[in-house]
Image (cartoon, rainbow, N blue to C red):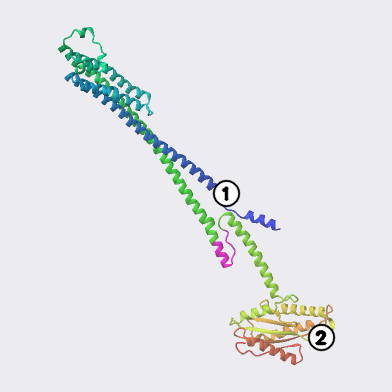
Amino acid sequence: MDRENEQQGKKQVRGIRIKAFNFWIIMVACLLYGALIFETLSVAGQYEELQSVSQRHIACERAASMVREGSNYLTEQVRLYTATGERQYMDLYFEEANVTRRRDIALAELSTYKVSDYLTEELANAHQASNDLMEREIYAMKLVSVATAAEDGTLHDQVRAVQLTEEDGRLTPQELLQKGQDLVFGDEYQQLKQGIMGQIGEFSADVLDRAQLLRTNTAQELEHLLKLQRILISALFVLTVLTFIFITVLIVKPLSVYAKCIKDDKLFEIVGAYEFKYLAVTYNDIYEINAANEAMLQQQAETDPLTGLINRRAFDRHVAVLKTSQKPVGLLLVDVDEFKTVNDVYGHAVGDRVLKKVADLLSQSFRSSDLPARIGGDEFAVILMEATFDQREGIRRKVEEMNQELQRREGGLPAISLSVGGAFSTQGYGDELFRQADEALYQVKKAGRKGCAFTEPTGQG
């Protein structure tokens, strides 16, 4: 039976299950956090890529600048030498070409960055053109050194190693000097030089265009990733708010409601998540069972087990309540005449049946609002709700009818009679009411029993 009730309770309860909600919240949160971590790493990667693009751009510009500066420096020194013939300019020239080597270093540094082969080749071509131009410049220095009759010991090895053409060998010193200067100051040299600078310029322009394109693409991707990151953060915020609402509505609120119900000794309201609703249904079932058991125990405690009437304890409790009322009330005290003799002659079993019959007659003869009670062994009382002295004759007739019924010898029961004393109060039950009813009962017994008497009302009993 208990299992059937449990199953029935489960069928009646509907609601969100904490366990299921908790599982899905954790799953969704893990997915969102995982996606957020992935997006964060992607953002970091794109940011690093953006920095790398900037670093490559800076490196390319630096390399272009070093090639340009190295080439221009060589041009400057060779021109100074051909114009003045001073050895120091030759030394500075070859120091740049063989020691400082800015052009070579620029290409070497560029290879350490992830620069496209196309761009690297552009700068390498400019470097090669600059190296090719060096042959012209060194030949020019050879012509000037021969024209100025510079000693071989003062010349740089690369200049000393140059052999003049047969045609140039027949030139005069002045012609040699003029030709050497023309080689580095003339239009042809300028065109070659412009070609080198143009290649370097094209390299810089391509680097700039490529860097801008990469920056734009990377920035767009970064913006897209940041947008997704903001969406994920917003989703996590919404999930957190929903979790707080869930906890408040489905957990915290039910706990507060249940605590109040326990404090007020009431049934639980069916609120909250499934588990709380199921707990409330179970608690209410137990509460109702306990209440029913308590009511049953209360009834048993206040009911005379033999007659089924209320006992002296319940009688006194009703009297205490009536003492707070100002409504009219009457009290009858009833004794079974010669009951001891009945027990002695017929036995206690018959005596109990006699008491049961008297109780049944009292319950049947008076109104449902009246309260018959067994207050002693063979002593009964009837509280007459809202009864007045004017109703005494009707009560007297009822007592006579009960005595007539009790005089019949039926079912092996002896003939018996009742003595009844009554009193009334117009202003609620008072301490005097019992005494007055007992006095009236005494008068009936004194007059020979089997009768009914009443005392005059005196206001509040």
Q: Name the element at disc 1.
A: helix
Q: Identify which residue is drawn at 28% across, 20% down.
A: 130
363, above or below 183, in the image: below
Q: Name the element at disc 2.
A: helix
In the picture, the quarter occupied by the C terminus is bottom right
Q: Tell me which amino acid carries mark 2.
A: Thr
Where does the image place residue 249, in percent across and percent down from the top left?
A: 52, 56
Q: Tell me which amino acid carries mark 1.
A: Ala
Residue lying furthest left = 174
269, above or below 432, in the image: above
53, above or below 298, in the image: above
* Label 1 – label 2 distance at C-alpha: 77 Å
Mark carried by residue 20? 1
**Residue 318 sits inside the magenta stretch:** no
Q: Which residues are magenta?
A: 257-270
Where does the image place residue 432, in percent across and percent down from the top left?
A: 63, 88
Which of the two residues, 125 or 333, is positioned nearer the viewer here? 125
Mark carried by residue 335? none
Residue tagged 2: 341
Would residue 194 be found to the left or right of residue 299 on screen? left
Would residue 254 be found to the left or right of residue 7 on screen? left
Going from N to C along the chain, the mark reached first, 1 or 2, is: 1
